[in-house]
Image: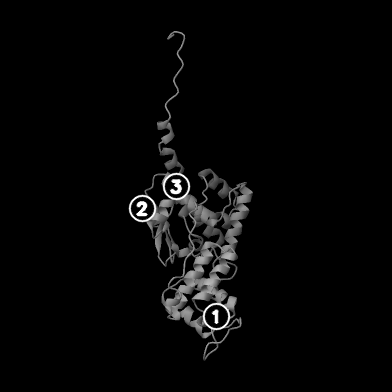
Amino acid sequence: MVFAYGGGSPEPLTVRCIMTPLRQRFSDDLRLRNKSPRTIEAYVHAVAKFARHYNKSPELLGPDQIRQYQLHLIEQKVSWSQFNQGVCALRFLYNVTLKRPHLVEHLPFAKRPRLLPSVLTRDEVAHLLTAALPGRDRMLLETAYSCGLRLQELLGLQVSDVDGARMVLHVRHAKGSRDRLVPLSTTLLVQLRAYWQEYRPTTYLFPGLKPGTALHDGTVQRICRRTALRAGLSKRIHPHTLRHSFATHLLEAGVDLLNVQKILGHSHFNTTAKYLHISQRRLQDLPSLLDGLIPPTPTPPTEAQS
């Protein structure tokens, strides 16, 4: 799963699991721009799929082949996020590494569907947490919900990130390589201390099987699915559902939008504002236009009035 040429003039590539010059240069360019390891892995994978589709180095391919490849992705019905990730990877490859920006100048992105996130009620969250297996599983879900963390932020937490003196959780290297502080509730702090006393994690708060590694994201996904079934919840629940629910419940509790934005670590205000559309309190507080348009039904006269 590589893309590159084997020295000299570019030649058609065969798929080989080696680090070729173009792939190395592409990875280096991504690292120089401080892209996260997951972004680098995703971009390399996207360009490798493009090269494998034609069995040629990207240096030998131009705008016509890129366009046909995009049409191929549409025929394969890939998700809009996977489609756009491929666009970003190819734009970076041709703009930065190959220095041929004219080849991707008009490379289109897929339109992102505007879907409202799935959100649990407070009672549903309580049922989910109660149904979780005591110990690591319950602590994972409680931390994810109580702090509104993304999955990778949750898995990246280290023991030293829990600051009980200041009552904050230090989220490091979050999306966009930004750190932030998240309020830590007294209840969660007590539970985290009890969890540490029982499991004694050294580096990562939720360690994986191998020493010095974090828990795998697939493990957390499975924990969510199993716990949702155990709780009898029909909604499709994944780790990010807890983050969506956390944000919505903050707004329903009266926390202003700017503070919610800071807690969640959103770069753009509009990203946080989408939770206004699903806040039950806000929807119930809005006046009903229909009530103002339809005249009230007249009360029939009583016998005394007639």
Question: 206 or 297: nearer the eye?
Answer: 297
Above or below, 144 relative to 88: above
Dot 2 or dot 1, earlier in sequence: 1
Q: In which quarter of the image is the N terminus?
A: bottom right
Task: Write down the residue under mark 3.
Answer: 277
Residue 140 is situated, as x and y percent measured from the top left of the image, at: 54, 57
Left or right, residue 202 beside residue 180: right
Q: What kind of colouring is applied to the model shown?
A: one colour
Question: Tag on residue 3?
Answer: 1
Residue in view at x 55 percent, y 88 percent: 6
> What amino acid type is highlighted by mark number 1?
Phe
Residue in view at x 57 percent, y 60 percent: 220
In the image as oriented, which residue stretches furthest toward the bottom?
8
Q: In which quarter of the image is the C terminus?
A: top left
Above or below, 294 relative to 76: above
> What amino acid type is highlighted by mark number 2?
Leu
> What amino acid type is highlighted by mark number 3?
His
Question: 81 or 126: nearer the eye?
Answer: 81
Residue 241 visible: yes
Task: Write down the residue under mark 2.
Answer: 258
